[in-house]
Amino acid sequence: MNTERLKKGLLNLQLPWDRQIALRFERFHDILDEYNRQMDLTAVLDEDERVDRHDLDSVAALALTGFPEGAEIIDVGTGAGFPGIPLLILRPDLQLTLLDAQQKRCAFLREALTRLELTARVVHARAEDAGQWPELREQFDVVVSRAVATMGVLQELMLPLARTGGKSIAWKGPKGLEELESARRAAFLLGGHLLDPVSVQIPGRPDWSHLLLITEKIRPTPAKYPRKAGLPGKKPLA
Ligand code: SAM
């Protein structure tokens, strides 16, 4: 792993850096390499791109929007743990839940957390189901998600999990701008209010235009949402 690049990037974003953070990122990259040889976990990228696209992209949000001390946070469709695990490495105070529909990814996440000596809950479920479970519905201060669905769909997967007064944060590329209108309409139906997009600058990547689409949860989500598994994707609300 290119530790020096990660250190420079984090300091550039005015995020913390110490020996434990370095060790955990290095160990996480090693575990990803080991599992990537056995299963299709993440795209295989060169070392620099992996630091930028996975680690820095995941944690840049900490510099741009509030994550209250000890906040309950859930990562919807976390895959190999992005953005959730890098966020937890920098902010071990967060009460993190990692949610994914694939059992083998959940098994990887449990093993990775053990080896990183980090604590998080791993839930194997579809977000449409989890959003109706009393122990998860409207329980989270912050709901995060990257690379899972278009915004019209994603709002229905994320917002039912956020408590009123909490928020959802979707990591998006430049195409996120085309999804704003559907995101706004879906947010309205689900008890949310979409804020203006926040532009993310990844250090050393001036040509990347990443966005955070943040939706504030202003009232409870109507009980009929999320609809049954698969329906948000087939018939997006917006
Ligand atoms: N968020 C990670 C990232 O940025 O690298 C993984 C993105 S991967 C392209 C999409 C992940 O979302 C997969 O692991 C998939 O199993 C999960 N996923 C897709 N739809 C889902 C749903 N409805 N509920 C839970 N997980 C879902």
Image (tube, rainbow, N blue to C red):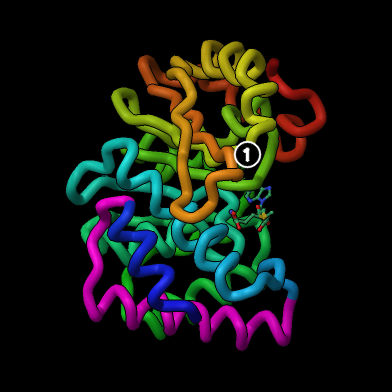
Could you say which is closer to the camera, residue 199 or residue 39? 199
- Residue shown at 63% from the left, 24% from the top: 177
**Magenta stretch prevailing secondary structure:** helix
Residue type for callout 1: Gly
- Coordinates of residue 123 in the picture (x, y in percent): 51, 59
Q: Is residue 218 left or right of residue 36?
A: left
114 in magenta: no
Could you say which is closer to the camera, residue 156 or residue 25? 25
- Residue shown at 49% from the left, 24% from the top: 197
In the image, the segment drawn in magenta is: 13-39
Residue 160 visible in this rendered orientation of the protein? no
- Coordinates of residue 126 in the picture (x, y in percent): 63, 48
The residue labelled by disc 1 is: 173
- Coordinates of residue 114 in the picture (x, y in percent): 40, 82
Circle 1: is it few (<14), some (14-19), or many (20+) Cα within 10 Å? some
Could you say which is closer to the camera, residue 157 or residue 6? 6
Q: Is residue 162 left or right of residue 19?
A: right
Q: Is residue 119 left or right of residue 53?
A: left
